[in-house]
Image (tube, helix red, strand yellow):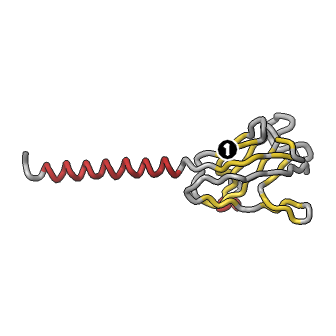
Amino acid sequence: MKKGILPLIFIIAVSLIVALSCEKVKEEILQVTIRGTVTNGGQPVAGAFVLLLDNDEMATGFPIGNASITAGNGDYTIIRVEDGTYYVAAVKDENGNEAYDFGVDPIGWYGHDSFGIIIPDPVVVSGEDVSGIDIDTMYVQ
């Protein structure tokens, strides 16, 4: 074998290993989840759309980073979440028209109670699953 071929094979092999390792790391990062439960007055809200709103994209008018739908018990899991800061909101499409209807569809968000009003809290994702992101009040506006 010629002298120049062996280093070339080595470089190609190392490049493939690095490329495959990067893909594996990317897959692992994208396996991060956000979990919680949506309830209203203590009752589970089934079939609500749970939206992951990207804090950095709020000004663009299209901040939806990902979404999920609640199960019968109100539980949801948002999968493939990238690192970042988000807000989590839920909307129950009461009439099934796949649009938010003011005065009809209840909406809620993850946050804290301040004198009877839920103030949205950011959810920070940094490489690990996040749980307990519960929404317990839905408003019809």
Up the image or down, 121 lies above or below 78; here it is below
Pick the quarter of the image with the N terminus: top left
68 relative to 139 in the view: left or right: left
Q: Residue at x 68, y 58 (%)?
A: 86
Q: Residue at x 65, y 46 (%)?
A: 78
Up the image or down, 139 lies above or below 92; here it is below
Q: How many marks?
A: 1
Q: Residue at x 72, y 48 (%)?
A: 36
- Name the outermost residue toward the bottom: 114
96 relative to 85 in the view: left or right: right
- Name the outermost residue toward the left: 2
Dot 1 alpha-carbon crowd within 10 angstroms: few under 14, some 14 to 19, many 20 or more: some
Q: Position of residue 57 (x, y in %)?
A: 66, 59
Up the image or down, 94 lies above or below 63; here it is above
Q: Position of residue 122 (x, y in %)?
A: 71, 62
The local secondary structure at tag 1 comes to: strand
Which residue is under mark 1? 77
Q: Residue at x 84, y 49 (%)?
A: 107
Q: Position of residue 100 (x, y in %)?
A: 82, 44
Q: Nearer the viewer, residue 33 or 6?
A: 33
Three-letter amino acid code at the position of disc 1: Thr
Q: Nearer the viewer, residue 59 or 52?
A: 52
131 relative to 102 in the view: left or right: left
Q: Position of residue 41 (x, y in %)?
A: 90, 47
136 relative to 65 in the view: left or right: right
